[in-house]
Every structure is written in structure tokens, then in C-alpha cells.
Image (cartoon, helix red, strand yellow):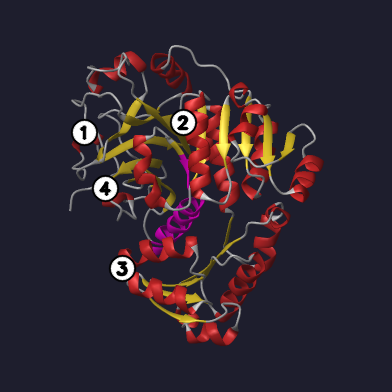
Amino acid sequence: MKIVVAGGGKVGEVLCAELSTQYHDVVLIEKKAEVLERLLDNYDITGLVGNAASYDVQMEAGVDSADIFIATSETDEINMISAIMAGKIGVPHTIARVRKPEYSSQLDFVRDSLGIDVLINPDYSAARDIAAIIKYPSALSVETFMGGRVSLVEFEITAESPLLGIPLSEYRSKFGSVRICIIHRGDEVIIPNADVHLKPEDRIHVTGFIKDMNQFRQVMVDKEYRHKSAMIVGGGRIAHYLLDLLCKAHISPKVIESNSKRCEELSAKWPQATIIQGDGTDTNLLDEEGLLNYDAFVSLTGVDEENLVMSIYAKKSGVKKVITKMNRIKILKILNDIKIKSIITPKQLIANDIIRFIRSRANAQGSNVEALYRLADNQVEALQFRIRRGSKVCEIPLEKLRLRKDLLIVSIVREQHLIFPSGRDTLQAHDRVIVVTSDDQLSDIDDILEA
């Protein structure tokens, strides 16, 4: 597929890196020559310097022959204008990043009236994920599928865990539907079979029916209680969306923000929240504002190093749940040593959304990828497929399917029924299926079979 990306910023670079390795023809439009030159040197792409909202620039980039146009510049208006223009030129599918709350409140109207196929808001996606992590006190991360019916929840195994030494084959008898889908052990990622045992400091992704998951969590931790409060440092766009989600969940938030105008705006919109003007990187201020009295701490400034330092301080101070926003993924390599586990990377969230859309369009005749998440430091994908009639996987017991290595069928939704399958279950036409795999090239449910 030919894909034109407008904007070589954080998101644009992630897309160039990932799409160029998936045999796509990627063309980048970037206003800054030095940025374009760096990305051309680093990735197998072509590009040109220019304004993506210019008709002449789009034509020079070959937009008229492109399959997908993606606008990811820093300006919402430029993204929308360039995506509309690309659609008028004839691109079949257009995607635009839109971040401002005033646009996000009317995304459906903007999308339908302007003819843009996908409008994506990374700040809202980040806020949604943060809120989910806060709601699951013992979880490191939470990903949801099937409209929230299926969750993949990440936990860490402690040296005192009663789960140590039990083969996964015994989990059905102990925890019903609960399935361990991924084990992240140091730098190694394992899609486990029934004979695997857990080890201390393993990070596991688990799914199952809610009642079984609740029983499993009670084994994971001695006592789990609902988080009722959160301290947030940084009052930007992510905080805007997060405040709305937390207040609706009856979690009391406090925001520390240095910009006085922004403090006034947040205070006016959310009078039930506590808004403090000050420097959130000042540990004395954090202590004065009662850091230890809060169940969760979230660092959301625009500087990765500040977020990291504040999170370390909150963790060492004894805050139960610490969540850190990071943009530069390479910095994450040191985090295992300092025990910061819940990481939010907005640019990766939006890249995942866009790549899911591209995967589904790249295989228009197959069982399209309806949802995609990257897990375990992006080494594993969890994909949601819809099965078409006549698929090679239909009506065969799962235990008899010759599946690819390092792949697991996690769950099935059939009509309104959720199934966590055993080897005797079968897949049927129109089922929705969740698959976990370390293979990043799957685009159809038939791809789960050995070639």
C-alpha cells in the first residue's frame, strides 16, 4: 500500500518506523528540512519538504495515487484541512489527529460532515488508559476489547505469590476462565503453554470472566481496595480528559499546574477537583499538598525526565499506584531497575490505532483486524478478528488446529455470548476472536495457521 504521512513529529516518526518495515510505500511530508532529512536517513521512506495543506505539495507527494493519507502534524486545523483535501483528490481513506477538547467533544459530527474516515485523539486515549489503571489498584495496565467485555490486565508476580510453582494447566480448576496470555520475564516475552510455571518478578497479562478475575486478584494481593483519590502533576490536555473520567468514577483528583491561566480554566470546568498553582517538580510542594494521602500519583508534564523523577519520588514515598507519561521510548529501558511499572506513551497509543486501521484495509477481503494492542514493550500484539464464512479455521476443534508458534486464542464472542475456550471449542463464522501473538504480520484470522 502507498501511505502518505503528513508531519514528522513524534507520531509521524513512529508511523514511518513501523509502516516502512511492513512493506508499505511510505511518503513523508514535513515542513522542516532537517527533520525530514533525519527521518529519511533512519527509515526506508521517501519524502519532501512542504506544507501538507497545500494542493501542489500533496500532488508532488503523489497523494492522487495513495491508498491512505495520515495527518499527524502538531496543528489540528492543518490536519483536518489536509485530510479533507486528500479525500477530495481521491485518497480512499484519510486519518487525522485531533487533540483540542473543543473539537473532540464533537468528533462524530466533524468526521461525518468533513468526510474524514478516522479522527484520533492520543490525549483522550492516554487519559482513558490512565483512568482504567487507577480503577484496577493491583494492575499495571489494562487493555479492553469487544466494547469493554474482554480485558487484558497486567500484574506483577511477587516473591511471596501463592501462584509460584503451579503449572498453568491447573489454573482452570482453581480460577475457572482465567487465562495467562503473556509472561514478560526480564527481556524475554513468553506466550505460555500449559506446562509453564511463573517466577518472581514476572509480569503477566491475564483475562477471564469478571467473577473469576476478582477471585484471581484476591490471590494476587492480600487486600485490594478501591482507589478514591489521585494527585496529578501537569494540567495539559491529558489532564483535561482525565479529570472528566476520574470525577465520573467518583475518584477525587488534585492537579498541580504551573500555568495560572490553565489553573483557572480547570478550576472553572471541574469545581469538584482541587487545582493548585505551583511547580509539581518541587518535592517540598508535593509533600505539603499531602502526596502520601493520595492513592495514585500521575505525572503528566511535557518533560520525560521530570515525569520520571517525580514518579520515582512518589514511589519511594510510598504512593500505592504511580503512573508515568513518557514520550521517548528508549528511556524506558532503565525503568526496570527503578520499579516504575505503569507507563503511558501517547504517541504509541495513536500509532497502534492507525496501524490497526491500516491492517484492516490492507486485507479488505479477509477477516479484518478490528482492534490491535501492543503489549510487553511492543513485543506482543493482541488482535481482534471477525471470522468470515469459509475461513480455514472454522468448525475445527482448537486442539486440532495447527497454530503458529507463540500464538494463543484468548477469547471468542459468539452472538452475545463470551467464551474463554478450551481445546474442544471451535471457531464459527461471524465469531469475534481475540488472538495474542509475538508475530507482528498477522492481518487475517487464517494467518494463525502454520503455513
Residue that badge 2 annotates: 417
**From mark 1 to mark 4, how far is it between C-alphas?**
13 Å
Q: Secondary structure at mark 1?
A: helix
Image coordinates for residue 260, horizontal then vertical, percent: 76, 47
- Given the image, on which type of amino acid does mark 3 rest? Tyr
Say whether marks 3 and 2 touch (CB < 8 Å).
no
Q: Quadrant of residue 294?
A: top right
Image coordinates for residue 241, horizontal then vertical, percent: 66, 44
Q: Which residue is the extreme one toward the front?
A: 284
Q: Which residues are magenta?
A: 343-364
Image coordinates for residue 392, horizontal then vertical, percent: 26, 49
- Given the image, on which type of amino acid does mark 1 rest? Glu
Residue at 66% across / 28% down in the picture?
Answer: 288
Residue that badge 1 annotates: 399
- Given the image, on which type of amino acid does mark 2 rest? His
Image coordinates for residue 45, horizontal then vertical, percent: 36, 74
**From mark 4 to mark 2, how far is it between C-alphas?**
23 Å
